[in-house]
Image (spheres, rainbow, N blue to C red):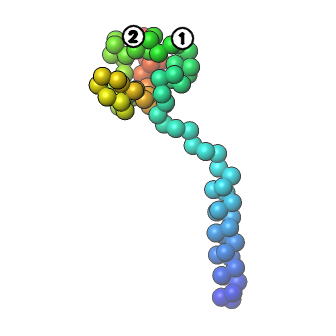
Amino acid sequence: MEEILNRLDAMERNLIALIQANQPAPESEWLDAKTFCRLVSLRDSKALMYEMSKGIFNNAAVKNIGTIKRPRYRFHRVKALNQFMNRIK
């Protein structure tokens, strides 16, 4: 009986490993400016910076991973997209 339980446990571990190996890679939550521009169909990052200057994004949607003099913005995939699409309201 114990041998059967050990074999079942081994089979379960193998199935879990197989399922996890076949999962698609998760998409990154944070996008760079170029990728976000393509996602929302803006022509370039200057247009995106113009939209940012209007204040449509809050702190949860955009973060600066660069310096103050040379900012490198990252945009949250869901939050920034929702705020960008709701900017007309």
- Find residue 88 and report its image quarter: top left
Determine whether the residue tagged by mark 1 lies in a helix, strand or loop. Answer: loop
Point 35% across, 23% down: residue? 70
Please state if 89 lies on the left or on the right of 13 as rendered. left
Q: Residue drawn at (34%, 11%), measured in percent from left and top?
A: 54
Residue 81, can we see it?
A: no
Q: In the image, 1: left or right of 30?
A: right
Question: Which disc number belongs to residue 85?
Answer: none
Rendering coords of residue 34 (x, y %): 51, 22
- Residue tagged by mark 2? 50
In this orientation, which residue lies closer to the viewer: 27 or 67? 67
Separation of residues labelled 2 and 1 (CA atoms): 12 Å
Near mark 2 (Cα within 10 A), the count class, few <14, some 14-19 or many ≥20, is few
- Residue 21 visible in the shown view: yes
**Looking at this view, is 77 or 4 the one in front?**
77
Q: Farthest residue in the left direction? A: 68
**Quadrant where the image shows the C terminus:** top left
Q: Which residue was labeled with disc 1?
A: 43
What residue is at 36 percent from the left and 24 percent from the top? Answer: 71
Which amino acid does the dot numbered 1 rest on? Arg
